[in-house]
Image (cartoon, grey):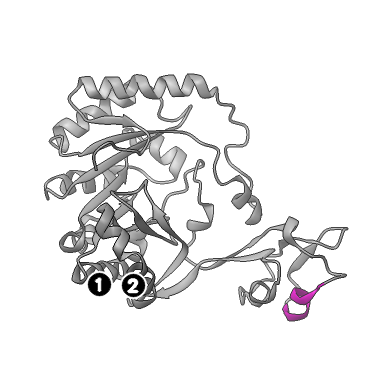
Amino acid sequence: MDSGIIFNVQRYTIHDGPGLRTEFFLKGCPLRCPWCGNPESQKSNIELGIYSKKCIGVEKCGDCIQVCKQQSLLFSEDGKIHSIDKKKCVNCRLCAKICPSVAIKEWGKVMSVEDCMEIVRKDKHFYETSGGGVTISGGDPLVQVEFVVKLFKACRLEKIHTCFESDFHAKFNKVEKLLPYTDLFIADLKHMDSLIHKQFTGVGNELILECLEQLAKTGIPIILRIPIIPNFNDTQKNMEQTADFILNNMNNNVRTLQLLSFMRLGEEKYKSLNLPYPMQDLEVDREVLTQKVHKYVEYFSSRGIHAIAGTKEKHI
């Protein structure tokens, strides 16, 4: 697969791998985590997002109405677009291409390996001076693994560090394709109880745990992340079971365990997709949550696991 569907490209990032990095976010994910900060990443196809506040209004513009043969665009009383009738829309996306104010946004773009490498080469000097490189994230890029393999091959030929971030809900034979071309893996470890995992994310954790166990045997550096989500995984029991898994099943072959506090991300994106924000009713005492995260960091450290709060490592 020489091309992939990418919904975002971020240059000069510092949080997902060492040094300054170029990060490509790929469409498609088998999980449906209610705290997801990138709901536009979940479906594999290119989608349309609506940002009503940016709309000029039908009286001053109306270009989108002219190109929509399905009459699927819906407008509020003030003449601004507010949503799309998905039953009528055929996803031709002509309305987004013609919209002068980007009130209609295409979430996703087809990019070839060479398209990506043209962006990467612009920052090669920064990789060399900072120890950075290229990170692939999502969504879950295992959905488009064949494309990632070709992109990482191209990076490897030009001696560019590669990092792959995933939920790892897949058979390990998919991950094996990446092993010769990946310098660092980043993985989420959300919950050790498969039933609770499925209740909140839509899938069990068996494939994830199997992948992590097999990945630990390869010797390739791994960063594990636990998003600390109130009422989901923020219990001492879950942390103890997680520590047991890291020590016993992964032989503690984890470079760093990063504990991340829940953040209310993605609300505007959910609205743009005409979806309710699943965490709307969750009230979080930020100080209490921060204290809990630091308590868990101390616990993992006491078990001999290198753990930190957040993503910033002092030595990477």
For the record, the magenta segment spans 61-69
Closer to the N terminus: mark 1 or mark 2? 2
Q: Quadrant of residue 75?
A: bottom right
Q: Which residue is mark 2?
A: 117
Q: Is residue 56 visible?
A: yes
Rendered image: mark on residue 154: 1
In front: 257, or 88?
Answer: 257
Rendering coords of residue 151 (x, y %): 29, 70
In front: 123, or 3?
Answer: 123
Amino acid type at circle 1 is: Ala
Q: Residue at x 65, y 51 (%)?
A: 271
Q: Quadrant of residue 74?
A: bottom right
Q: Indicate the secondary structure of the residue bearing disc 2.
A: helix
Amino acid type at circle 2 is: Met
For the residue carrying disc 2, how many other residues have a C-alpha within 10 Å: few (<14), some (14-19), or many (20+)?
some
**Tag 1 and tag 2, C-beta contact below 8 Å:** yes
Q: Indicate the secondary structure of the residue bearing disc 1.
A: helix
In front: 145, or 173?
Answer: 145
